[in-house]
Image (tube, rainbow, N blue to C red):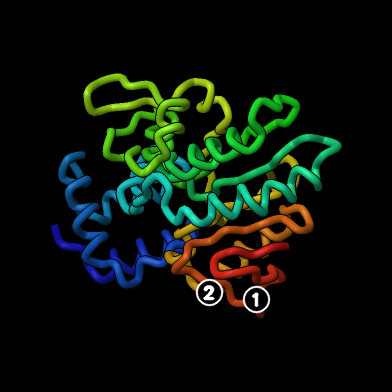
Amino acid sequence: MQLTDKEFSWIVSYVHKRYGINLSQKRVLIAGRLENYLLRNGYQNYSEYFTKVEQDPNGEEATNMINVLTTNHTFFMRESLHFDYMKNVALPWVKQHATSKKDVRIWSAAASTGEEPYAIAMVLKDFFGLDTQWNTQLLATDLSTRVLNHAIEGKYLAEQIAPLPDKWKRAHFTRISNEEYEVKKELKKDVVFRQFNLMDDIKFKGLFHIVFLRNVMIYFDEQTKRNLLNRIYNHMENGGFLFIGTTESIDKTGTNFKYVQPSVYRK
């Protein structure tokens, strides 16, 4: 099955316009992943499939396409310095700033298969302890429904949870087989998973104190990044903290975020 120049241009344009993702240098990836999907599902060529996607951009095939094309690589305690900083600096500020409402608003904006939001939830459990007056439920979103379903299920192999502190493994996971563990219900209820396209307007209730936007902007061009960062800025509390990937950076002239240290910014 041959991906023509016209078909390649169509999908690059469609995915960039709808999701902000730049696939202009990913022709081999597109062909490799989509060809297998099309053959399994009885399509004769790429154009037949793209026509179906275009006819129903919110339909099942459009969802399947982005699930197939997006790479969701993550692991527990990735860039662990962010969790230390959150516990030692950001959360003490939140506790002082939001003491009247006792409502911590945190957004994991590229949640993938759940490792990041569950790690954040465990940090919150450690920090607030038995103080049940605080609402510590956090929002976790991703574009891919496939990875969100994995996250909601909350099942991980022993090797996947190996980087976690032993006390977290004991407190927040149940062993369900020799090689598999499941996040306990008490922690699951602290994370609200939602499908969300970062190109859409942010209409979540309330302003966020902390936003994790890690290792997703590498797929965006500079203008898309600036637009996204400005939307997030407008939906954060004054003084709120933004964490990005340690290999990422923000153009200081394009947004109002203030640099704190590498990969950490504040409104």
Where 168 sits versus 49, above or below?
above
Counting labels gives 2
Residue 87: x %, y % from top left: 61, 47
Residue 144: x %, y % from top left: 42, 44
Name the residue: 49% across, 50% down. 110
Label pair 2/1, CB-CB below 8 angstroms: yes
Q: Is residue 75 visible?
A: yes
**Residue 80 — which label?**
none
Q: Quadrant of residue 24?
A: bottom left
Residue carrying label 2:
222
Residue 43: x %, y % from top left: 20, 45
At label 1, which amino acid type do we have?
A: Gly
Q: Residues within 10 Å of mark 2 (few under 14, many from 20)?
A: some
Nearest the viewer among 154 and 194 is 154
Image quadrant for the N terminus? bottom left
Q: Residues within 10 Å of mark 1 (few under 14, many from 20)?
A: some
Q: Quadrant of residue 180?
A: top left
Q: Secondary structure at mark 1?
A: loop
Relative placement, left or right, of 71 versus 138 is left
At label 2, which amino acid type do we have?
A: Glu
Where 192 sits versus 108, above or below?
above
If you read the primary sequence from the N terminus, does the residue marked by circle 2 or circle 1 appear first? 2
Q: Secondary structure at mark 2?
A: helix
Relative placement, left or right, of 248 versus 52 is right
Residue farthest to the left, as pictured: 1
Name the residue: 66% across, 25% down. 130
Residue carrying label 1:
254
Residue 65: x %, y % from top left: 34, 48
